[in-house]
Image (cartoon, rainbow, N blue to C red):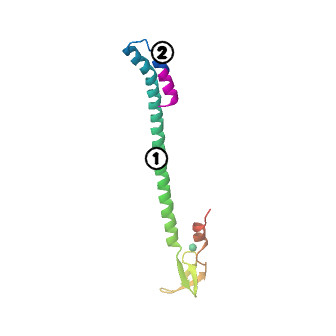
Amino acid sequence: MTDDLRQRLSEAIDDCRTLTPEALADAVFGVVHPELDRLNQEVDYLKRNIRRSRDQVDGYDQELTSAKAAIARMRALHQPTQHMGQTWCTTCSTRRRTGPDTEEWVAYIPHPCPTIDAIEETP
Ligand SMILES: [Zn+2]
């Protein structure tokens, strides 16, 4: 109970000392009822905000899950490989087929490559 409501109830009761119990109850209800209506409206407003916030959290959670999956797919693409004693990115480095079972490296991009650096960069 708020101090304001307590004060209004006290004043209503004080004003009704000479009334019958029924009239006193009506006077008290006259103060309490509007307060209950106001509180019900506040509860409805809070329920709507909670529902909206939950929907937003669900949306953010789905976006986060999707972003994490995309990062995992990028990491899986940009794996390190050893060649000529050094570590290179398998995706960013370029190889070309020179035969059915042979290939030739034509561009060497060190691992971690710029893509992995961008993923791991902290803002
Ligand atoms: Zn790469």
Q: Quick one: which residue is furthest to the left in this view?
A: 22
> Quick one: SS at disc 1?
helix
Under mark 1, the amino acid is: Arg
Residue 10 position (above or below residue 109): above
Alpha-carbon distance for marks 1 and 2?
47 Å
Mark 2 = which residue? Answer: 15
The residue drawn where x is 49% and y is 72% is: 76
Q: Position of residue 9 (x, y in %)?
A: 47, 23
Within 10 Å of disc 1 (Cα), the crowding (few <14, some 14-19, many 20+) is few
- Quarter of the image for residue 115 reads bottom right
Query: As drawn, is 103 to the left or to the right of 123?
Result: left
Which label number is shown at residue 123? none
In the image, residue 5 lies in the stretch drawn in magenta: yes
Front residue of 97/109: it is 109
Report ligand 1 position as a quadrant. bottom right
> Quick one: SS at disc 2?
helix
Residue 14 position (above or below residue 68): above
The reply to whether the C-beta atoms of the residues labelled 1 and 2 are less than 8 Å apart is: no
The residue drawn where x is 61% and y is 66% is: 121
Magenta part mainly helix, strand or loop? helix
Front residue of 43/118: it is 43
Q: Position of residue 43 (x, y in %)?
A: 45, 35
Q: Which residues are magenta?
A: 1-10
Mark 1 = which residue? Answer: 54
Query: As drawn, is 46 to the left or to the right of 20?
Result: right
The residue drawn where x is 57% and y is 80% is: 88
